[in-house]
Amino acid sequence: MTGRRARTGRGWDASPPRAGDADGPPRPRRGRRGSSGGAFSPHADADAPGDADDWGAGGVPQEDADAPRGTGAPPRDEAELAREVCLRQLAVRPRTRAELAAALAKRGISEEVSAGVLDRYDEVGIIDDAAFARAWVSSRHAGRGLARRALANELRRRGVDGEVASEALDELDEETEAETARALVDRKLRTARGEPDAVFRRLVGMLARKGYPPGVAIRAVKDALAAQSAEAAEFADGIDADALADAEGDLTPDARPLD
């Protein structure tokens, strides 16, 4: 018949069935593991095992199949870890030997290893408590206006030896302390409000918290008030700095500085 292909005993003649013909062979499904010629699909089950070429027996990746079971990275050397801890600490700011020893102990480094690493750092000058103390005194006095007493407490809390701290503090003499105290009071007076007696007490307390002795604090505030105004000067004239200092005694038992 016209329009239809003749059939032979061998089945359909003419050209082979085209891909997609209903009667042709099924097309292989792509994107499924285990199917011949199929590529790995990103939409396949992420928890399913990979191709046989990628995985060894028992689900172990082929690249790991020859590695001994139960082995990981070798344990790190304790001294190497101690050095890394110290360098990270020193990258933030200079540290005393006591501060670094505390940091190592917190990380579980043994005392023997810690002492060996810190001794070596002492030898090469990476740790220098004397230089630390001098720099600390200079920086905290200039930046915060702290007096010797407050600075001594800060150095002690950081583990600096008492003799080393004293040598650093000797560079801050009484005259410099008095000048710094007066500068602090002058700056605070520019924004101070209230009656002269209340302002006087607040400013003396401020200096006390920064570690200034009672005599130095009282004199600095009295002189600053005397130069401020007639009313303040009249109040200051009635202050007996020496007697008041003796009566006040130690204004700051622990000399904690203001932050």
Image (tube, helix red, strand yellow):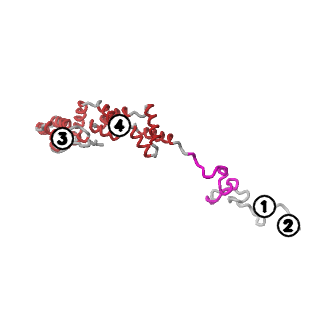
Report the disc number at residue 18: 1
Image marks 3 and 4: residues in contact by CB distance under 8 Å: no
How dense is the environment of label 3, judged by Cα within 10 Å: few (below 14), some, or many (20 and up)? few
- How busy is the neighbourhood of tag 2: few (under 14 within 10 Å), some, or many (20 plus)? few
**Of the numbered discs in the image, which one, if any, rests on residue 160?**
4
Q: Judging from the image, what secondary structure is the residue with disc 3 in?
A: loop
Q: Nearer the viewer, residue 149 or 112?
A: 112
Type of residue at label 3?
A: Gly
Q: What residue did someone put label 3 on?
A: 249
Of marks 2 and 3, the one in the foreground: 3
Where disc 4 sits, the SS reads: loop
Amino acid marked by disc 2:
Gly
- Closest to the camera, between mark 4 and mark 2, is 4
Magenta range is 45-74
Sequence-wise first label, 4 or 1: 1
Q: Secondary structure at mark 1?
A: loop
Q: Position of residue 98 (x, y in %)?
A: 39, 39
Pick the front one: 43 or 158:
158
Q: CA distance from mark 1 to mark 2?
A: 15 Å
User: Looking at the picture, which amino acid does disc 4 mark?
Assistant: Val
Amino acid type, residue under disc 1 in the picture: Arg
Cα distance between the residues tagged 4 and 1: 90 Å
Residue pictured at 50% horizontal, 40% vertical: 79
